[in-house]
Amino acid sequence: NAGVTQTPKFRVLKTGQSMTLLCAQDMNHEYMYWYRQDPGMGLRLIHYSVGEGTTAKGEVPDGYNVSRLKKQNFLLGLESAAPSQTSVYFCASNAAGDGELFFGEGSRLTVL
Amino acid sequence: RKEVEQDPGPFNVPEGATVAFNCTYSNSASQSFFWYRQDCRKEPKLLMSVYSSGNEDGRFTAQLNRASQYISLLIRDSKLSDSATYLCVVNSRGGGADGLTFGKGTHLIIQP
């Protein structure tokens, strides 16, 4: 039972580099989310999707882009990484917007 | 006032004791409430939903007080394995996919 899988789990970037985080879920969920978690802060929503081909901005979208070309995948891109984007990124999915969230194991990103 | 507030702790509690902590929310129109558990360096996982009538799951009891705008979590006969961070989650925007607001968490340490 894979659930929600994130890759990569760890990455170190230099300022200005780009990268993409991949989230895959095998539960046929409509809704997918990207959150970031920083020390002393709650989980904050970056972007989300309510279905294949749709994306929407969350609370902290600046500096990130997303795509949901396939229902099972939700990609988070950083076009030009900044040290402020050093964080733990969690992908999550659920069947309905208000239901239980299923999280991936997280991706730890460090931007130097 | 922040949308969702929790005492960060840590709460240091001896094994077998009862511990309770609250979470306050600012939006009186909030409709859904949850407790998630997050172990160190792991992803959050749903512990329980919080219903208007309160609910109990084994040693865990969650209650909602709409008049005072807080939810509570009570853990009886605490176990070492209960050590974790407990996240209060409130849907503050009428049930929409972007409406979940996470508290910063309460850190609980059960001591032998």
Image: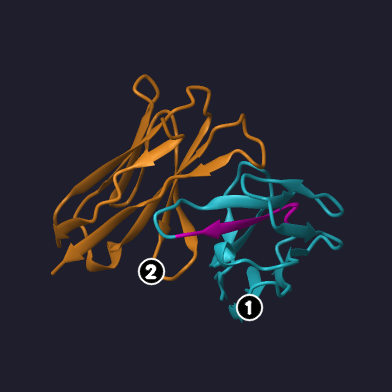
Chain colours: A cyan, B orange
In the rendered image, the vertical position of residue B32 relative to residue A50, given as above or below: above
Q: Nearer the viewer, residue A82 or A70?
A: A82
Q: Name the residue carrying label 2.
A: B40
Three-letter code, disc 2 = Cys
Kindly identify which chain the residue marked by label 2 belongs to: B
Q: Which residues are magenta?
A: A29-38
Would residue B100 be found to the left or right of residue B6 on screen? right
Q: Is residue A54 above or below residue A64?
A: above
Residue B64 visible in the snapshot: no
> Mark 1: which secondary structure?
loop
Residue drawn at point x = 28 percent, y = 63 percent: B83
State the image coordinates of residue A59 (x, y, percent, origin top left). 62, 44
Q: Residue A105 sits in which quadrant?
A: bottom right
Quarter of the figure that contains the N terminus of chain B: top left
The image shows residue B4, relative to residue A31, as above or below, that is above
Magenta span dominant secondary structure:
strand
Kindly indicate whether the residue at mark 2 contacts the one at mark 1 (C-beta within 8 angstroms).
no
Label number found at residue A14: 1
Residue A17 in the figure: left or right of residue B4? right
Mark in the foreground, 1 or 2: 1
Residue at image x 62%, y 66%? Answer: A82
The amino acid marked with disc number 1 is Lys
The residue lying toward the viewer, choosing from A48 and A77, is A77
Chain label for disc 1: A
Give percent across and percent down for residue B52.
Answer: 43, 28
* Residue B79, quarter of picture: bottom left
Mark 1 Cα-neighbour bin, 10 Å: few <14, some 14–19, many ≥20: few
Residue drawn at the location 39% of the way across and 66% of the way down: B39
